[in-house]
Amino acid sequence: MSVIGKLVTLLRGSARELGDSIIDANGVRIYEQEIVDARAAIAKAKEELTGVMAKEMQSAREIERARAEVARLETLAVEALDKNKEALAEEVAIKVAEQEVELEQQTRAHAEYAVYAARLKDLIKASENKIREHEREVQITRATESVYKATQTISENIGSSGSKLISAKESLERIKKRHEDLADRMSAADALEQEFSTRALEKKLAEAGIGNDAQRKEKALERIRARHAAGATTDAKA
């Protein structure tokens, strides 16, 4: 298959959407390799285009040379006629005819080279644009694939009971509970110490006859003495 045929095939294949087929890493790598192959084909086409353009320039020079030769021979034929050299003029005319045939051939070849070069330029340009689109699609696909992998990893870590995230979360919960337990113990110790301190203080106050406990003791003692006095009085009357 010629290079131009390969480029036409490339453009035809590019009309199909390939995004659905790129579903895993192997698909992406295959797609990238196809892009590399397409770029190689374009590089080959550019080499061929260079050759065609060179032939186009060569044919243009040949056209100018043939035209100049025709003009020169016609001048010589006119001079031969001026000198009544009819046979020589006819011989020169044959050469003019041969040069005109070559001129026509070179003109036709030049036109073909120009058409082929223009067509090849258009195909190369269109192919390069399509390859850039495919390269952007590969980049988007790779980015999307990375997001899917990250999402899948997170989902697996969160959903798996033996996952690292779950283990880490359970460890944090245990640490949190230990901290709460330690805080509760410290609060209980503070409350207990305060209670003991308050009782000790109240005891000292009571012993010194200060506070509610001391007054209650005095009142109780007064009631006892009053009952004792009342009992003694009753016995004396009897």
Image (cartoon, rainbow, N blue to C red):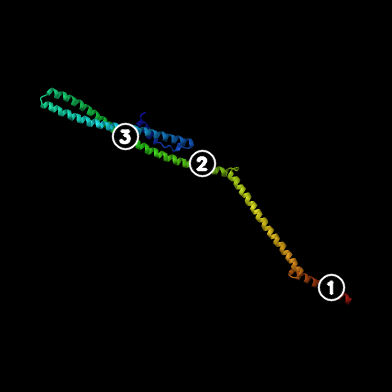
The quadrant in which the C terminus is found is bottom right
Q: Secondary structure at mark 1?
A: helix
Number of numbered discs overlaid on the protein picture = 3
Of circles 1 and 3, which is in front?
Answer: 3
Give the Cα distance between marks 1 and 2.
96 Å
Residue underneath mark 3:
119
Q: Quadrant of residue 125?
A: top left
Give the mark nearest the N terminus, 1 or 3: 3
Q: Residue furthest right?
A: 238
Is residue 228 found left or right of 31 in the rendered image? right
Give the Cα distance between marks 3 and 2.
44 Å
**For the residue carrying disc 1, how many other residues have a C-alpha within 10 Å: few (<14), some (14-19), or many (20+)?**
few
The answer to whether 168 is drawn above or below residue 38 in the figure is below
Of circles 1 and 2, which is in front?
Answer: 2
The quadrant in which the N terminus is found is top left
Residue underneath mark 1:
228
Whether residue 107 is visible, yes or no, is no
Q: Amino acid at mark 3?
A: Arg
Could you say where residue 74 lies in the image, as x and y percent from the top left?
Answer: 16, 28
Q: Secondary structure at mark 3?
A: helix
Q: Residue furthest bottom?
A: 237
**Residue nearer the viewer, 118 or 97:** 97
Could you say where residue 236 lies in the image, as x and y percent from the top left?
Answer: 88, 76
Is residue 38 found left or right of 207 in the rendered image? left
Label 1–label 3 contact, CB within 8 A: no
Could you say where residue 35 lies in the image, as x and y percent from the top left?
Answer: 41, 35
**For the residue carrying disc 2, how many other residues have a C-alpha within 10 Å: few (<14), some (14-19), or many (20+)?**
few
Q: Amino acid at mark 1?
A: His
Residue displayed at 44% across by 41% down: 139
Residue underneath mark 2:
149
Q: Amino acid at mark 2?
A: Lys
